[in-house]
Image: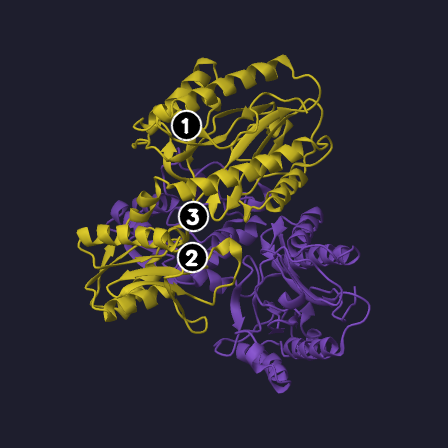
Chain colours: A purple, B yellow
Amino acid sequence: MSELYAARRTRLRDRCAAAGDAAALVSRPANVRYLTGCAPPGAAVLLGPDGDRLLCERPLSGDPAEGTPAEDLEVTVLPTREGDPVVAGADLAARAGADSLAVEEHHLTVARHRALAQVAPRLRLADLACAVEQQRFVKDEEEIACLRIAAEITDQALGELLESILVGRTERHLALELERRLVDHGADGPAFPTSVATGSHAGRPEHPPTDRRVEEGDFLSVRLGANYRGYRCEIGRTFVIGTTPADWQIELYDHVFAAQKAGREALAPGVECRAVDRAAREVLEAAGYAEHLGPRTGHGVGLEIDEDPRLSPAAMGKLDACVPVTVEPGVHLPGRGGVRIDDTLVVRPEADGGPELLTITTKELLAL
Amino acid sequence: MSELYAARRTRLRDRCAAAGDAAALVSRPANVRYLTGCAPPGAAVLLGPDGDRLLCERPLSGDPAEGTPAEDLEVTVLPTREGDPVVAGADLAARAGADSLAVEEHHLTVARHRALAQVAPRLRLADLACAVEQQRFVKDEEEIACLRIAAEITDQALGELLESILVGRTERHLALELERRLVDHGADGPAFPTSVATGSHAGRPEHPPTDRRVEEGDFLSVRLGANYRGYRCEIGRTFVIGTTPADWQIELYDHVFAAQKAGREALAPGVECRAVDRAAREVLEAAGYAEHLGPRTGHGVGLEIDEDPRLSPAAMGKLDACVPVTVEPGVHLPGRGGVRIDDTLVVRPEADGGPELLTITTKELLAL
């Protein structure tokens, strides 16, 4: 594994060198984790003339959820709580003879950037911009393996809940129950705050769980995901509570299912992101739901639950093989409820069977 | 309540005017909440020449945990997801004729600050620094009332757990159970990730819960807190599992109890923060535990779980009446366990009875 992290750092270092920067300082937590295997709070990783170094505010906690630093990486813990790892990194880079340092201007605050400039006034500060995020776009097989496990854990947690009694329980309790089961099945934690939405809440794109109780006849939509070794996936399913869905529920479900299927089937290397969004969106527009749609159909996942690419009408990029994304269209009818169906898939060439579905819980409309 | 928020904004506006700034843009979430009653993700509040305005990235979610904006406050939701409220705020300020704008340089990234400067090139950008945090230091009675309720909820959740069976349960499960009970008793959520540490983990200052099971004879230390309307408090208690604590456990507990008592009794308006730390620390140093102590004895609480003041050896400030703080000394003996005792109190004048204890769960050593 150490070689993996070292190779990622080398690739970044080469890119910086090509841009004229002898050194780089990475501080966004997901990016630090990508390059070193761990992301203690406040840590930064310096890719400097003298080699690579992880700078921490305090001793590593041993919390497995924080990850473990690659064995060959130098780790420096700053004394007491007074130091800023980013300032320490700039100081080290300057002393090692770097004349320029690329930093993450989309992460560092103005105050920290000034402190950095003050400690190393002769260092030319450049912008690393989203170089690490771009490197993270295409996942390697180890990363996809973690996402597969995260999806398995997620499917297990959801599956167990479906076997339990739901009527009468609150959205909040169901969400907490799901999160407990994620951890029981081996997750480091939930990938994001679990959403459970029942009755007229169902299908809302972002619904924080409330004390509303599940009732017979409700649509119930849930959205959850596991964080496994930092890798986060996501699943969303909608069910009907009780024995027989109403006609309007079956009809709405069929439309959203068709839209999500169209979105999934549009995934292939080289396809424009906006085309995937279009494929799902036009099914729902044709069914008359244009005003009830959200701004986007899906997004990338990895060390963050919401990464590039974004599958939206204005998205400018294209997909590649080994890019994991969600496809999660939905319709919410205020006062009535709605349906949202969400999978995590990995883009694969058609010759290899098309997109790899990670979240395999059935998408058939279940009456629970 | 609207008048409360308007008064806070007026006080901040007056301070900026005195510093020569006609307008201010606040973006740190806790500060936005303090000034407006709510803090939707990414929102910013502009105190401009034309009045005050809350700028949001998206429509308010209705999540009570996000708060509710003061009724008299103008709220603007930016179209789609393309806008940055901070950039929109700068644009509005410039159009309203402000010649300077104070921003939170300890919050805004370099990239956002550049975008702001680009949209309003004639606006002189100044640093608001920690003006809002300073205003938040002394709490008013409404804030203290929220902290009292948060503490009550926290005591209830802890009390219920103490009546349940603990042996054989994992740290993780106990932590999740405590968090569920916080929500059941009315919390918006936990104030911070709950810590449960058993056996040789006990007494660690920051211990993320593991799958370790509680056993007879263990020290068990827990640390939890409720978030009520944004206000966060904290309690920490250490217990012994089983019928009879060992002599070394009783002795260690007595020392930490005495240190925490000394820290609590040192709290008074006008007292130096480092003196409170000293009062607790010297008890433990005299007992021979100098190398096992943490860097600080406590910290302020409010809309954030960790605020000014910091009660540490190098702290420069003084306490005031109506400042809520934690007093949380502890000793961790690697391989054996330890004790940590943590209360949230409000500094009050001696004439009013001295510090007001919010977290009232007994501090007597209980064998559970």
Mark 1 to mark 2 CA distance (whole Å)? 55 Å
Count neighbours of disc 3 (C-alpha within 10 A) and say few if under 14, some if 14 to 19, many if 20 or more.
many
What quarter of the picture does the C terminus of chain B occupy?
top right
Residue B267's quadrant in the figure?
top left
Q: Is residue B17 above or below residue A292?
A: above
Residue B307's quadrant in the figure?
top left
Q: How many marks?
A: 3
Q: As drawn, which residue projects farthest toward the bottom?
A: A286
Where in the figure is residue B360, as x and y percent of width and height? 53, 29
Where in the figure is residue A110, as x and y percent of width and height? 31, 54
Residue at 52% over, 37% down: B151
Location of mark 3 (residue): A44
Q: Is residue B291 visible?
A: yes
Mark 3 to mark 1 CA distance (whole Å)? 40 Å
Element class at badge 2? helix
Dots 1 and 2 on the same chain: no
Which mark is in front, 1 or 2? 1
Residue at 76% over, 64% down: A216
Residue A13, which numbered label?
2
Dots 3 and 1 on the same chain: no
Location of mark 1 (residue): B355
Nearest to N terminus: mark 3 or mark 2? 2
Asked if marks 3 and 2 touch (Cβ < 8 Å), the reply is no
Residue at 47% over, 14% down: B288
Which mark is in front, 3 or 1? 1
Under mark 2, the amino acid is Arg
Residue A43, which numbered label?
none
Residue at 58% over, 46% down: B186
Dots 3 and 2 on the same chain: yes
